[in-house]
Image (tube, rainbow, N blue to C red):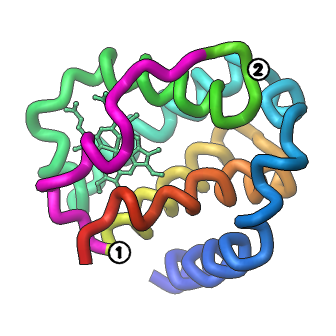
């Protein structure tokens, strides 16, 4: 719990400090991360966590893991400046009707941080990735 609180604080700091700069300065983020192999590992680790996390797993009851994996890989790839085009639904369309709360979004982010740790992504790159995805919070949540 303490761990989660620290992560939430870090997340808010990251969000407020980096939001406006995230896209402008990160053309090389995809390369710095290690490209597709590392993004694949992050996504595998993320899905291992969110699909088994009792706080949010119920939302993924009908999810086909391989399909979601593929979409998240291509989204992370595109958002970090990689050579991919994300062709899934947009974030508002996908998540509308799920009534996702801020607290559930924070659980997802915490799992995302753990997934990047497991993939051995350096801390400063984790922050850059988080800043990009944090900017999607209002599209994904409903509160
Ligand atoms: C920045 C955070 C997030 C990103 C980047 C993200 C990304 C995505 C993507 C790419 C899809 C697939 C869209 C498609 O089918 O075309 C998706 C679906 C979904 N997301 Fe998210 N998501 C985020 C946060 C969340 C959170 C916080 C929850 C719930 C706690 C959530 C629950 C779901 C569910 C249930 C689906 C449907 C999966 C299915 O097709 O069965 N997402 N998300």
Residue 6 coordinates in the image, percent (x, y): 61, 82
- Residue 108 relative to residue 61: left or right: right
Label ID, residue 57: none
Q: Main secondary structure of the magenta part?
A: loop
Q: Nearer the viewer, residue 77 or 85?
A: 85
Using the image, determine if residue 58 lies above or below residue 3. Answer: above
Using the image, determine if residue 76 lies above or below residue 15. Answer: above
Question: Residue 38 sits in which quadrant?
Answer: top right
- Residue 37 relative to residue 4: left or right: right
Using the image, determine if residue 70 lies above or below residue 125. Answer: above
Tell me if residue 62 is in the magenta stretch: no
Residue beneath the point at 77% across and 42% down: 121
| Quarter of the rendered image showing ligand 1 | top left
Residue at the disc numbered 1: 102
Residue beneath the point at 77% across and 47% down: 23
Q: Quarter of the image for the N terminus: give it.
A: bottom left
Residue at the disc numbered 2: 35
Q: Which residues are magenta?
A: 85-101
Residue 26 coordinates in the image, percent (x, y): 85, 42
Crowding around mark 2 (Cα neighbors within 10 Å: few <14, some 14 to 19, many 20+) is some
Question: Residue 102 sits in which quadrant?
Answer: bottom left
Q: Assign a secondary structure to mark 1.
A: helix
Question: Residue 82 sits in which quadrant?
Answer: top right
Residue beneath the point at 25% across and 78% down: 143
């Amino acid at each position: 719990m303490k761990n989660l609180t620290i992560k939430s604080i870090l997340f808010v700091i990251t969000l407020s400090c980096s939001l406006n700069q995230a896209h402008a300065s990160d053309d090389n983020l995809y390369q710095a991360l290690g490209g597709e192999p590392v993004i694949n590992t992050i996504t595998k680790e993320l899905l291992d966590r969110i699909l088994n996390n009792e706080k949010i797993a119920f939302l993924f009851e009908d999810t086909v893991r391989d399909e979601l994996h593929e979409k998240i890989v291509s989204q992370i790839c595109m958002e970090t400046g990689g050579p991919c085009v994300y062709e899934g639904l947009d974030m508002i369309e996908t998540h509308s009707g799920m009534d996702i709360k801020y607290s559930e979004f924070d659980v997802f982010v915490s799992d995302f941080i753990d997934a990047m740790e497991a993939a051995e992504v350096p801390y400063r790159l984790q922050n850059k990735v988080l800043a990009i995805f944090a900017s999607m919070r209002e599209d994904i949540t409903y509160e």
